[in-house]
Image: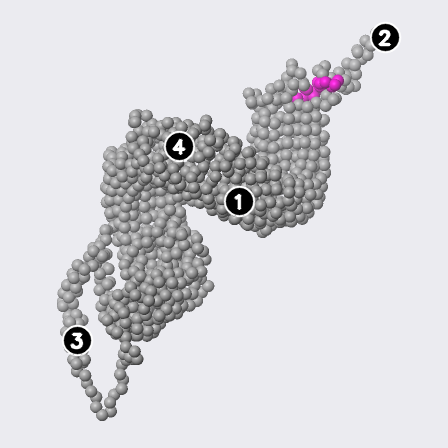
C-alpha cells in the first residue's frame, strides 16, 4: 500500500511534464474552504505588475503583490474556488502605462470583473486585447485616462452586464470616441447588458440613430448614462421599448426639442437627469407622477416651461432640481407630502407667490435653493428640518421679520443666504449661536435697529454680510470675537461712531473688510506702521468713511483691492501706494477726494493694476501713464492740463474703459489710440481737444461709447462704421464738425444715443436712421440741417425713441403725422413695462462688475438748459423749436401721453392748438410761442395738472383764457402777443358777445374814411425802420460797425449763460451769433 502511494506521488510530476496537466501548479496557500490559488495565475499577475508603470508610494493594491505574501492578501484580486482570478480591481492606483495587446492581463481567461477606473493612462488607446476576456460581465474604465476610438473588440464580450467608459469631459482635452465603430456596432452583440455608462464619450449621433441602436440591441437595459456625448435630438420614440429602464442620464447634450411624454411610461424610473439639453416646450406633468421617481434634474434648460403639480402622499421624490428654467406658478402646498425630499433647487425660475408653510414638514431636507424667483410673503419656519445645511432664498420679494423660532435647532446649518429681499425688523441674533454656521448673508434688505451685542459660542463663522440695510448704532465689540471671520461687510448702513482701524487687527483671518457708506468716522491710525494692519487682508473698502488721511498700508503684502473713495483725503498720492504687495494691487479707487498731486519721483504704475479710478479730485499736471495691462482707467473731473500722450495706445491696449473728461486737456487725439482695440468706452468730453477724429475710432468694432462732447474737434466724420458696429452712444455735441452724417452709422444696430448737436453739419434729415430700432436719444440741435423730416413709409420704427431735439436748424415743411405713430416710447403703453421707468440709460462696462457708464444729455426744459447726467428711460422730450416748420400741429401728438417736454416754438405753425394735447397728462413744459396759431386755447389744456411751464405768446390766439388747475399759476408773459386773448392773468377783460378782432375788407361806395390816428404811427415806424435797415443792406462799413456794437451788447447780456470752461470764447461767440440770426429772422 505504501509502494502504491509513493508511486502515485511520483507519477504526478511526470503527468505535468508530458501531458500538460496543471495539477502540480496548485499553490499550497489556502483560500479557505479548501480553495487554493493557482500558481500560474499568480505568476501572470506578478508579470503584469512588473510591466505596469505606477506610483508605488501611492499604491495600496499592486504593492501587496509578491511571492512572499499570501495570495489572500493581494489587494484588488478575487479568486474563485478553483484558484482562478475572477475579479481584478486596480482602480485609483495611478497606473500610467504598461498595457498593450499582448499584456499578461489578457491571459486571465476566467476574469469576470475588471476595474481600471481612476488611473492616468496618458490618453493612450484602449488595447484591442480586452476582447480576449470573453467571460467579462463587468468592465470599468471610467476616468482611466484612455482616449481615442473604442475598439470593436469590446463588442465580442457578449456576457457583459455593465460597461463604464465614463470620462471627465473638459473642452479641448482628448476624449474617447465612438464613431467607427459607432454605438450600434458596439452594442449589437451585448444582449445581456444592463448598465451602460459612456459619460463624456464623443458619439456625435442623431436621435434616431442612437435611440434605435439601443432599443434593438439591449432590450434589458436598466441604466442609461450618456451625458456630454455630443448627442442630438429629439429623443426617438423607439427608446420606450426599453421597458426596464430605471435610470436615464442624458444631461449636457443638445437635443433642442420638447421632453417626450413617453418618459412617463417607464414604470421603474428612479432617476431622470436632462440638465443643459436645450429642451423647450412644456414639461409633461405626468412625469412628476411616476411613483418610483427619486431624482429629477431639468436644470439649465432656459426655454423649458412647466409648473409643479399636486404631489401625492408619501411620494418617492428625494431630489428636485429645476434651476435656470422657465418653470413658473406657485409651489403647491402639497410639496410637504414629499417626506423623502433632501434637495430642492428651483433657482432662477419664474416661481411666484408665498413659500408654502408645508415645507416645514420636510424633516429630511438638507439643501434648499429658491433664489432668483418672485417669491413673496414671509419666510416659513425651518425648525423641524434639523438636517438643513444650506438655505438660499436670495433675490426674491420676501417681506416681514424673521422670528428667531424659525431657525431654532438648525445645528447643521452651514450657509444662510437671504440677500436682496425686502425683509425687515431686527436681526435674528440667535443666528450667531448656531454651531455649524459659516456664512450669514443678509445684504440688500430692510433690516433695522442696532446690531446688538451677542454671545459668541466657539464659532466657525467665516462670512458676515449685512451690507445695504438700515442698521444703526455702533459696531458691537462682540464682532471682534469672531476669530474665524474671513469676510466682514457692514457697508451701506447707518452705523455711527468712531472706529479705530487698528481694532480690526484682532480678526487675524480677515481677508475682506468693507465699512463703506455709513456714518462712521474711521481713525486711520494703524499703530505700528512697520507691521501690516491685517496679514491676510486682500480687500479693503472704506468709501465715505470721513477719512482725512490715507491709512499707511505700505506693509500689506496681499492687498489686491483698495477703495478709499468719497472721503476727505487731501495732499499728494504717496509713492508707496503703487508698491503695495509688490504689484499685487489690481483695483485702486481714490475718486471723490481732494487729492492734488502724485508724489515725485513718480514711478511706473504696477502693470497689473486693472482698475485705476482717480476721478473727481484736484489732480494737476500731466496725465499719468496708465498701467500697462489696465482695463479701467478714469482720470475725469480733475485739473490735468497736458495733452494726451502720443503713445497712449500702447498703455491702454487692453483697456475697455478710458476717460479723461472734464479736464483742461488740449492738443489732438493721437493716432496711437487705435491700438486700444478692446476699448468699449472712450470719454474725452469737456476738454479743449482740437484736430480731427481718427478714423479708427469710427471703424472700431468693440467701441460701445464714444463721447467727444464739448471740445473743438473739427473736420468731417471720416471712415465707415463697421458692419458689426457695437456703438450704443455716439456723442459729438458742441464741436466744430462739418459735412454730412455718414450713412454707415446705420450699421450700428445697438445705437441708443446719437448726439450731434451744436456743430456745423449741413445735411438733410437722416431718414436711414429709421432702421435703428434701438435709438432712444436723437439730438441734431443747432446745426445746418434742412429739408423735410418726413421719411418714406417703411416697416422700421423708432419704438424706443424718447428724446428728440431738432431745434435751431432749417428744417421745413409739415410734421409727419403718421410717422409719429411709431414712437411708442412716448406713449403710455411702453413695451419695456412699468419696471423700466426705474431704469437709467447706461452701459455696463464689465459684465461681472458694478461699473456703469452713465449717458448724459442736455435738454431744454422749463425754459432752461439742463444736463441729465442720469437719463431715466421714462423721460421723454420733443424739441422742434426755431425751424421753418409750417402747417397745422398734428392731432397725433396727443398720443404721446408719456411726454414731459414739448417745444414747437419759433416756427410757422398755423391753425388751432389741437385739443388732443390735453391728453398729455405727464406734460410739464409746453412751448408753442412765436408761431401763427389761431383760434381759442382748448379748455382741455386745463387738465394738464403737472404743467409748470406754459408759453403761448406771440401767436394769433383769441377768446378767453381757460381757468382752473395749473392755468391759475401762469403769468401774463405766457400769453402776451395775442391781441385777441382776454381774461386772467391779462389785464383785458372778456365782454360777452364781443366778436373777435377781424380785418375789415368792406369799402364804402360813396367815401373812404382814413383814420390817421392809426396810420400815422405806422408810417413813422416804417420810415424809421427803413432808415436803419437800408444802410445795413447796402452799406458794408455801416453793417460791420452795427454788428460789432450789437455783438458787444449781446456779449454782455449772454456772457454768464454761454461761458464754457474749454474753448468757451469761440463757442459762446458762435452761440450768440446763431441767436442773433434767429432774432433777426423772427423780425
Work out how far the residue at label 2 is from the one at label 3, CA to CA, in angstroms. 163 Å
Would residue 633 be found to the left or right of residue 126 on screen?
Answer: left
211 relative to 905, above or below: above
Q: Which is more N-terminal, label 3 or label 4?
A: 4
Q: Earlier in the sequence, mark 1 or mark 4?
A: 1
> In the rendered view, would you say 221 is above or below 86?
below
According to the picture, the residue beneath numbered tag 4 turns out to be 453
What range of the chain is rendered magenta?
31-45
Determine which residue is flagged by label 2. 1
Among the 4 quarters of the image, the one containing residue 504: top left
State the image coordinates of residue 1078 (x, y, percent, origin top left). 25, 66
Q: Secondary structure at mark 1?
A: loop
Mark 3 = which residue? Answer: 1021
Question: Could you give the CA–CA distance between mark 1 and mark 4, rounded to whole angstroms?
Answer: 31 Å
Q: Decide which of tag 1 and tag 3 comes sooner along the chain.
A: 1
Residue 44 painted magenta = yes
Q: Residues within 10 Å of mark 2 (few under 14, many from 20)?
A: few
Q: Is residue 757 above or below residue 385?
A: below
Q: Quadrant of the C terminus?
A: bottom left
Amino acid at each position: 500500500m505504501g509502494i502504491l502511494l509513493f508511486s502515485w506521488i511520483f507519477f504526478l510530476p511526470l503527468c505535468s511534464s508530458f501531458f500538460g496537466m496543471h495539477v502540480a501548479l496548485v499553490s499550497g496557500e489556502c483560500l479557505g474552504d479548501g480553495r487554493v490559488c493557482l500558481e500560474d495565475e499568480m505568476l501572470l499577475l506578478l508579470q503584469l505588475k512588473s510591466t505596469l508603470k505606477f506610483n508605488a508610494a501611492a499604491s495600496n493594491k499592486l504593492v501587496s503583490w509578491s511571492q512572499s505574501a499570501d495570495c489572500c492578501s493581494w489587494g484588488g484580486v478575487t479568486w474563485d474556488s478553483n484558484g482562478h482570478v475572477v475579479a481584478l480591481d486596480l482602480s485609483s492606483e495611478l497606473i500610467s502605462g504598461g498595457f498593450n495587446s499582448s499584456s499578461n492581463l489578457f491571459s486571465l481567461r476566467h476574469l469576470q470583473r475588471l476595474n481600471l477606473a481612476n488611473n492616468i493612462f496618458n490618453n493612450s488607446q484602449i488595447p484591442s486585447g480586452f476582447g480576449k476576456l470573453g467571460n467579462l460581465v463587468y468592465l470599468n474604465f471610467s476616468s482611466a485616462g484612455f482616449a481615442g476610438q473604442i475598439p470593436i473588440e469590446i463588442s465580442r464580450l457578449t456576457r457583459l452586464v455593465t460597461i463604464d467608459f465614463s470620462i471627465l469631459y473638459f473642452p479641448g482635452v482628448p476624449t474617447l470616441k465612438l464613431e467607427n465603430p459607432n454605438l450600434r456596432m458596439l452594442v449589437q452583440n451585448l444582449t445581456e447588458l444592463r448598465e451602460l455608462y459612456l459619460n463624456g464619450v464623443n458619439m456625435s449621433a442623431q436621435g434616431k440613430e442612437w435611440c434605435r441602436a439601443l432599443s434593438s440591441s439591449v432590450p434589458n437595459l436598466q441604466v442609461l448614462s450618456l451625458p456630454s456625448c455630443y448627442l442630438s435630438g429629439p429623443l426617438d420614440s423607439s427608446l420606450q421599448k426599453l421597458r426596464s429602464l430605471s435610470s436615464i442620464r442624458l444631461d449636457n447634450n443638445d437635443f433642442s426639442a420638447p421632453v417626450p411624454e413617453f418618459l412617463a411610461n417607464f414604470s421603474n424610473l428612479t432617476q431622470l437627469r436632462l440638465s443643459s439639453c436645450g429642451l423647450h416646450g412644456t414639461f409633461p406633468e405626468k412625469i412628476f407622477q411616476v411613483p418610483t421617481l427619486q431624482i429629477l434634474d431639468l436644470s439649465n434648460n432656459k426655454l423649458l416651461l412647466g409648473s409643479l403639480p399636486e404631489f401625492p402622499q408619501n411620494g418617492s421624490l428625494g431630489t428636485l432640481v429645476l434651476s435656470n428654467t422657465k418653470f413658473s406658478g406657485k409651489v403647491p402646498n402639497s410639496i410637504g407630502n414629499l417626506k423623502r425630499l433632501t434637495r430642492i433647487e428651483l433657482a432662477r425660475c419664474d416661481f411666484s407667490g408665498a413659500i408654502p408653510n408645508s415645507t416645514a414638514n420636510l424633516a429630511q431636507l438638507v439643501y434648499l435653493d429658491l433664489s432668483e424667483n418672485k417669491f413673496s410673503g414671509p419666510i416659513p419656519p425651518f425648525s423641524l428640518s434639523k438636517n438643513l445645511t444650506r438655505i438660499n432664498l436670495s433675490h426674491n420679494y420676501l417681506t416681514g421679520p424673521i422670528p428667531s423660532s424659525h431657525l431654532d435647532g438648525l445645528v447643521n446649518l452651514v450657509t444662510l443666504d437671504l440677500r436682496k429681499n425686502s425683509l425687515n425688523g431686527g436681526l435674528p441674533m440667535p443666528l450667531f449661536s448656531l454651531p455649524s454656521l459659516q456664512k450669514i448673508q443678509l445684504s440688500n434688505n430692510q433690516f433695522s435697529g442696532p446690531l446688538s451685542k451677542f454671545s459668541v459660542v466657539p464659532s466657525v463663522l467665516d462670512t458676515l454680510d449685512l451690507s445695504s440695510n438700515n442698521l444703526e448704532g455702533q459696531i458691537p465689540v462682540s464682532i471682534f470675537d469672531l476669530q474665524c471671520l474671513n469676510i466682514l461687510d457692514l457697508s451701506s448702513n447707518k452705523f455711527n461712531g468712531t472706529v479705530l482701524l487698528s481694532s480690526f487687527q484682532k480678526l487675524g483671518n480677515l481677508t475682506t473688510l468693507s465699512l463703506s457708506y455709513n456714518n462712521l468716522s474711521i481713525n486711520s491710525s494703524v499703530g505700528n506702521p512697520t507691521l501690516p494692519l491685517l496679514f491676510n487682508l486682500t480687500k479693503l473698502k472704506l468709501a465715505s468713511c470721513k477719512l482725512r488721511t490715507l491709512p499707511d498700508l505700505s506693509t500689506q503684502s496681499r492687498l489686491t483691492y483698495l477703495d478709499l473713495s468719497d472721503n476727505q483725503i487731501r495732499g499728494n498720492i504717496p509713492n508707496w501706494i503703487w508698491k503695495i504687495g509688490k504689484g499685487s494691487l489690481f483695483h485702486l479707487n481714490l475718486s471723490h477726494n481732494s487729492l492734488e498731486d502724485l508724489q515725485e519721483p513718480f514711478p511706473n504704475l504696477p502693470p497689473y493694476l486693472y482698475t485705476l479710478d482717480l476721478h473727481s479730485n484736484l489732480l494737476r499736471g500731466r496725465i499719468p501713464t496708465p498701467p500697462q495691462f489696465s482695463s479701467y482707467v478714469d482720470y475725469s473731473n480733475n485739473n490735468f492740463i497736458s495733452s494726451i500722450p502720443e503713445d497712449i495706445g500702447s498703455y491702454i491696449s487692453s483697456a475697455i474703459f478710458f476717460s479723461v473728461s472734464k479736464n483742461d486737456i488740449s492738443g489732438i487725439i493721437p493716432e496711437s489710440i487705435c491700438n486700444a482695440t478692446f476699448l468699449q468706452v472712450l470719454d474725452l468730453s469737456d476738454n479743449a481737444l482740437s484736430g480731427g477724429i481718427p478714423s479708427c475710432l469710427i471703424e472700431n468694432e468693440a467701441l460701445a461709447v464714444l463721447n467727444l462732447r464739448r471740445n473743438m474737434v473739427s473736420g468731417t466724420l471720416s471712415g465707415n462704421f463697421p458692419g458689426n458696429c457695437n456703438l450704443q452712444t455716439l456723442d459729438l455735441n458742441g464741436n466744430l464738425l462739418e459735412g454730412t452724417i455718414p450713412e454707415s452709422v446705420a450699421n450700428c444696430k445697438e445705437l441708443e444715443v446719437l448726439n450731434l448737436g451744436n456743430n456745423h453739419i449741413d445735411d438733410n434729415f437722416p431718414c436711414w436712421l429709421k432702421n435703428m430700432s434701438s435709438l432712444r436719444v436723437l439730438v441734431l440741435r443747432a446745426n445746418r440741417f434742412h429739408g423735410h423730416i418726413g421719411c418714406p413709409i417703411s416697416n422700421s420704427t423708432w419704438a424706443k425713441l424718447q428724446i428728440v431735439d431738432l431745434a435751431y436748424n432749417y428744417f421745413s415743411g409739415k410734421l409727419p403725422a403718421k410717422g409719429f405713430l411709431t414712437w411708442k416710447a412716448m406713449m403710455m403703453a411702453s413695451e419695456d413695462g412699468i419696471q423700466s421707468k426705474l431704469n437709467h440709460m447706461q452701459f455696463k462696462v464689465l459684465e461681472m462688475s458694478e461699473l456703469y457708464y452713465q449717458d448724459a444729455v442736455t435738454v431744454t426744459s422749463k425754459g432752461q438748459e439742463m444736463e441729465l447726467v442720469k437719463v431715466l428711460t421714462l423721460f421723454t422730450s420733443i424739441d422742434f423749436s426755431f425751424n421753418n416748420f409750417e402747417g397745422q400741429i398734428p392731432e397725433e401728438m396727443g398720443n404721446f401721453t408719456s411726454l414731459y417736454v414739448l417745444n414747437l416754438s419759433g416756427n410757422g405753425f398755423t391753425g388751432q392748438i389741437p385739443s388732443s394735447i390735453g391728453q398729455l397728462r405727464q406734460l410739464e413744459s409746453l412751448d408753442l410761442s412765436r408761431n401763427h396759431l389761431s383760434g381759442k386755447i382748448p379748455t382741455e389744456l386745463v387738465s394738464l395738472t403737472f404743467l409748470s411751464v406754459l408759453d403761448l405768446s406771440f401767436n394769433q390766439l383769441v377768446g378767453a383764457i381757460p381757468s382752473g388747475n395749473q392755468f391759475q399759476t401762469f403769468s401774463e408773459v405766457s400769453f402776451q402777443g395775442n391781441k385777441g386773448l382776454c381774461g386772467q392773468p391779462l389785464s383785458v377783460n372778456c365782454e360777452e358777445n364781443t366778436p373777435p378782432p377781424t380785418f375789415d375788407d368792406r369799402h364804402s361806395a360813396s367815401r373812404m374814411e382814413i383814420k390817421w390816428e392809426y396810420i400815422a404811427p405806422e408810417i413813422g415806424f416804417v420810415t424809421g425802420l427803413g432808415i436803419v435797415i437800408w444802410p445795413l443792406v447796402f452799406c458794408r462799413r455801416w453793417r460791420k460797425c452795427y454788428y460789432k456794437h450789437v455783438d458787444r451788447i449781446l456779449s454782455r447780456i449772454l456772457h454768464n449763460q454761454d461761458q464754457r470752461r474749454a474753448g468757451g470764447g469761440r463757442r459762446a461767440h458762435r452761440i450768440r451769433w446763431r441767436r442773433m440770426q434767429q432774432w433777426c429772422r423772427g423780425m
